[in-house]
C-alpha cells in the first residue's frame, strides 16, 4: 500500500471516529433533555436493587433507560425475562451487543420509556432524575398490574409511599396497590 493510500485510509478512519463521537454527544444531549443523562448504577447498587425487588425467575423485568445494559443483564442472569428500554442508539447497540456476547436472552428496545407498554411488567427499575420520575409516576400507576414492584435509584416518586428503602445504596422500592 502506498503512503498516499495509507494517509487517505487514516483520514477516513479519523473522520468516521469523529462523526461517531459527535453523534454520541448529540444523542447524549438529547436523552439528557428528554429524560436523563447517562450515568451508570454501580455493581453493588444493581445487586441491591434486584434483591430489594425480590426479582424471581421468569418474571418480566424492565429497565427504563437501560444505559450500557448492565442492570438488564444482571436481571437476565437471575432468570428474569429482562427488557432494556433505551433512547440513545449507541447505548441501545451496546446493550444489545453485550447481551449477544454474554449469551443472555435479554431484549433491548430502541424507544422512549414514555412510550413503552408496561402492563406485563413485574419489576421496573428506574434511574433517571427527579423531574423525570415525576413525569413517569402517572404512567407507572396507570399501567402496572397490582403487586408490581418499582425500584428507583436515587430519586423518589413524590406521590407514592415507598414500601422499603436501602439508604446505603440510595434505592427505594414502590409496590403497585
Ligand atoms: C442514569 S442512566 C441509567 C442507566 C442504567 N439504567 C443504570 O442504572 O446503569 C439513564 C439512561 O436513560 C436513558 N434515557 C434518557 N431519556 C430516555 C427516554 N426518554 N427513553 C429511554 N431512555 C432514556 C439515557 O440515555 C441513559 O442511558
Image: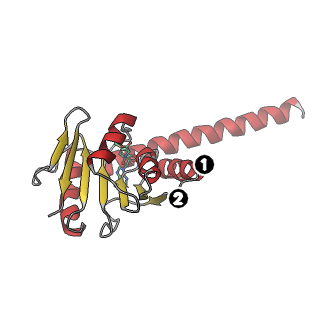
Up the image or down, 60 lies above or below 29; here it is: below
In this view of the protein, which residue sits in the foreground, 130 or 54? 54
Up the image or down, 139 lies above or below 99; here it is: below
x%, y% of residue 165? 18, 42
x%, y% of residue 84? 42, 55
Q: Quadrant of residue 120?
A: bottom left
* SS under mark 1: helix
Label 1 and label 2: CA atoms lie apart by 10 Å
Q: Are marks 1 and 2 in contact (CB under 8 Å)?
A: no
Q: Is residue 68 left or right of residue 100?
A: left
The residue drawn where x is 36% and y is 58% is: 61
Residue 66 visible in this rendered orientation of the protein: yes
Mark 1 residue's CB less than 8 Å from ligand 1: no
Q: Is residue 60 left or right of residue 10?
A: left
The residue drawn where x is 58% and y is 42% is: 19
* SS under mark 2: loop
In this view of the protein, which residue sits in the foreground, 96 or 130? 96
Q: Is residue 81 left or right of residue 99?
A: left
In the drawing, what numbered circle is on residue 52?
A: none
How many dots with numbers?
2
The residue drawn where x is 24% and y is 62% is: 148
x%, y% of residue 20? 57, 43
Looking at the figure, which quarter contains the C terminus? bottom left
The residue drawn where x is 71% and y is 40% is: 12
Label 2, on which residue? 105
Up the image or down, 52 lies above or below 109; here it is: above
Q: Quadrant of residue 70?
A: top left
x%, y% of residue 62? 36, 57
Label 1, on which residue? 101
Looking at the figure, which quarter contains the N terminus? top right
Determine crowd level at label 1: few under 14, some 14-19, many 20+ residues with C-alpha closer than 10 A.
Answer: few
Up the image or down, 154 lies above or below 141; here it is: above
Amino acid at each position: 500500500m502506498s503512503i498516499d493510500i495509507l494517509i487517505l485510509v487514516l483520514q477516513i478512519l479519523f473522520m468516521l471516529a469523529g462523526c461517531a463521537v459527535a453523534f454520541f454527544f448529540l444523542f447524549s444531549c438529547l436523552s439528557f433533555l428528554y429524560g436523563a443523562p447517562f450515568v451508570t448504577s454501580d455493581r453493588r447498587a444493581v445487586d441491591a436493587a434486584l434483591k430489594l425487588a425480590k426479582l424471581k425467575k421468569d418474571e418480566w423485568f424492565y429497565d427504563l433507560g437501560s444505559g450500557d445494559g448492565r442492570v438488564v443483564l444482571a436481571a437476565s442472569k437471575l432468570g428474569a425475562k429482562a427488557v432494556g428500554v433505551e433512547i440513545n442508539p449507541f447505548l441501545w447497540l451496546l446493550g444489545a451487543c453485550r447481551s449477544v456476547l454474554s449469551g443472555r436472552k435479554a431484549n433491548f428496545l430502541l424507544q422512549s420509556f414514555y412510550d413503552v407498554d408496561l402492563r406485563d411488567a413485574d419489576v421496573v427499575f428506574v434511574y433517571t432524575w427527579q423531574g423525570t420520575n415525576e413525569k413517569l409516576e402517572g404512567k407507572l400507576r396507570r399501567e402496572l398490574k397490582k403487586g408490581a414492584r418499582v425500584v428507583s435509584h436515587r430519586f423518589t416518586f413524590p406521590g407514592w409511599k415507598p414500601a422499603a428503602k436501602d439508604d446505603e445504596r440510595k434505592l427505594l422500592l414502590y409496590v403497585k396497590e
